[in-house]
Image: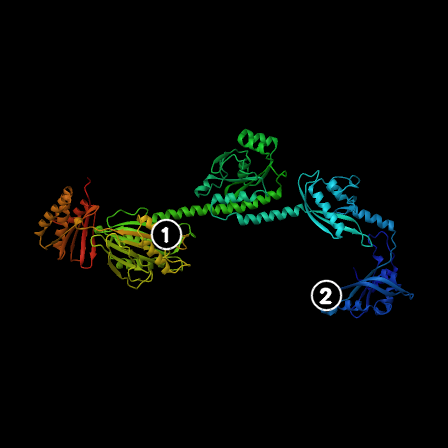
Amino acid sequence: MNVMTGSEAADDDRSAWRPEDPVDALATARATVDPNGIVTGWSEGARRLLGYRSAEVIGRPAAPLVAGEPPSEALRSLHTLPRWNGAATLLHRDGHHLTVNLLAHRRVPHSEDDGGGEWLLVSPLPRPSPPLEDDALLRWAFTQSPATSALYDTGLRLRRANGDMERVIGLPEAAMQGLRVSEIVVDSEGDRTEQCMRRALETGEQQHLQQVLRLAGHASESIWSTSLTPVKDAGGTVRGVLLSAYNVTEEHLARRRLALLNEASIRIGSTLDLARTAQELADVAIPHLADFVTVDLLPAIEGGDDPRVSSPPSPVMLRRVAYQSVLEGCPEVVVERGTVAAYPDESTAARCLSTGRPLIENVTASAMDRVASQTPDRAERMRRYGFHSVLAVPMRARGITLGVATFSRHRRPESFERDDLLLGEEITARAAVCIDNARRYDRERRTSLTLQSSLLPQRLPPQAAVDVASRYLPTSAQAGVGGDWFDVIPLSGARVALVVGDVVGHGIQASATMGRLRTAVRTLADVDLPPDELLTHLDDLVIHLSAEAHTTADIGATCLYAVYDPVSRRCTLARAGHPVPAVATPGGAVEFPDIPAGPPLGLGGLPFEATEIELPEGSLLALYTDGLVEDRGRDIDEGLDALREVLARPAASLETTCDTVIETLLPDRPADDVALLIARTRALDAAHVATWDVPADPAAVAETRKNTRRQLAAWGLDEAAFVTELVVSELVTNAIRYGGAPIQLRLIRDRNLICEVSDASSTAPHLRRARTFDEGGRGLLLVAQLTQGWGTRQTYDGKTIWAEQALPTA
């Protein structure tokens, strides 16, 4: 609505109405009044209504134009509301009163200087209209309305149908007049519509329906939102029902696509299992998108390697990973899960992969003949079940083509359309990312497990000191690797070292650190360091590793190191912040020996202390990491008590004991990595050990050779006598010449024959190559050549040189 100025109004006085104008602007009386009640605008229509020219009213108060006092509700509305409408009595220029319908709008001011804003007042001028013309206009409006409408009488017989209803039903109005809905639309929805129409007639209230219809002449079902409105006369009596229907198929399909996308985002990728993720894609697409779905992947990705960037070679080889159907048992399947099949160049899957773009293919007679010539078995299934439309979507993630997802229809009559293609692309893209994640996870997991298996002992070495069994359980949150470890290390003198450690953290980084520590422990054990000294060196190593690490977090670890001697049946233990081991004697008593805790590895500057205990033969020694006895829902004392109860019960074997410990203390997957090592001690009695004190006199060498020969004869090892006498002669001679008293010779018959010579000197010998004219320097070289191994270990009162040789075979 335009506000007219005074000059414009004067022009209006002189202007004539132009009948060719599409809008009759002069048929409306318009005026504007400012907040002070002064007339600021006056149209030609206003002049026609009240007889005043614009020059007579503009700039003057509007109150004299109103006959009598304005209604009180109008005054209140003018002060509070943005709009008012109602009947007003105005004063014509010739003095007679004129009652009109008045609509007043408050115009919002553009700035604070405009005050409260002016009012625009409009009123239509009387225009008599022939009733017959109005009836025709109503008829035309009903017929040409874009809403699908039909008018029924109280007998539910059709009286009128507009053009859109004729188009939808496919019948002219004349063919439908006098018929009921159930007679026009032969469908269960027709009966349902009539029930609602009766309810509208009985209650006088509007009814609403959501309907799925398959109308004659339409290829597919359509969704309709239908309103049934009772038509009443002036007295309120219901005279008929107006049916108004709106096709909401597109909106319904759009909502269903969004729902399917939401479902796909929830259901696809629930695990990091490649085959299960592919199956989740197939399950989601049935039945809302397709009747039959297959997922085929390039065989190369199953090994974890990235497929070639170029198009796959011809013919395309694909492995069937998943499929699903609306039919029970998936009878359409030709290629079973896990089978690698060839797809010719002209096949839908091959063309999709070669172009890298999705495609829709309607199954025509020529296309079926082509399939039959290439893969007859597939063509037979397609004909049997009536395949008519196929959608193939390449599975790509992070620039890599993984395979193809194929969606087919044979029950739904509609062919795939562009919207279906977009939906198939979206859910396939989500599945492809999840499958690629699963593929990468599987590759990393295999790498991690390979690393883990290379770092943990796969087969514990046989030795006479102990029988052992072990278990390793990584936390379920990681890829099967962690920082816990255990080890069994044979030492000289038939002794054995038992080790359990725990690196802080999980995953590959912790596992790599564990490997370095385990290697260091084995190296230090080979030097035959006492447990407390070994932990001191290991502590220094952890400090160096922390300094070399590229992270801000320090490397932390705990460790328990124990050395058991089957000859003396004594066990020396030291621990660095690690849980105390459990010791179960043959009588059934279980104790946790008092071993100084020591600081965790990596702190530095604090000493470690060793404790020595005597173990009866057949004792159980249980070493473990804290994940076995500690848990968020259980106190550590409860875990230790449970371990005590299990170890106190007799078991058929150490393997059974390990299983019982795990089942009792860890009924579910552990929240932390767990390493468990259980050893049953054995003892070497006097029948396996011979010991002689040797005087510090070169003449005593001959006597030690005789003693050695007699002992070997008693053990039935005469074949080893020659080599053993040479070894004993060299070691004893070195001890007498370079060592200090007391000197002792000990022979141990274990799986091998061990010769040990101890003296009071801490100076360790070393191997050197004698020159041609040297009279000495060949003793240790001879020992090294004649035995499987030799070495030196320091003791608290000197050293021991040992040599080990294989026993003669029977």
Label 2 crowd (10 A; few <14 / some 14-19 / many >=20): few
Image location of residue 703, percent across then percent down: 9, 50
> How many C-alpha atoms fall within 10 Å of the one at disc 1: few (<14), some, or many (≥20)?
many
The circle drawn on residue 724 is none
- Residue pointed to by mark 2: 110
The amino acid on which the numbered mark 2 sits, given as a three-letter code, is: His
Query: Taking 591 as reference, is 99 left or right?
Result: right
Q: Which residue is mark 1?
A: 662
In terms of sequence position, does the residue under pointer 1 or pointer 2 come before the other?
A: 2
Q: Mark yes or no: residue 64 visible.
A: yes
Q: Position of residue 94 (x, y in %)?
A: 92, 65
Residue 612, image quadrant: bottom left
Quarter placement of the C terminus: top left
- Which residue is at the front of the view, 784 or 248? 248
Q: How is the image coloured?
A: rainbow
- How far, Cα to Cα, is label 1 from label 2? 81 Å
Q: Position of residue 557 (x, y in %)?
A: 35, 58
Q: Amino acid at mark 1?
A: Ile
- Which residue occupies 39% across, 60% down? 635
Q: Secondary structure at mark 2?
A: loop
Q: In what quadrant of the picture does the N terminus appear?
A: bottom right
In the rendered structure, the answer to whether residue 745 lies left or right of residue 402 reads left
The secondary element bearing badge 1 is classed as helix
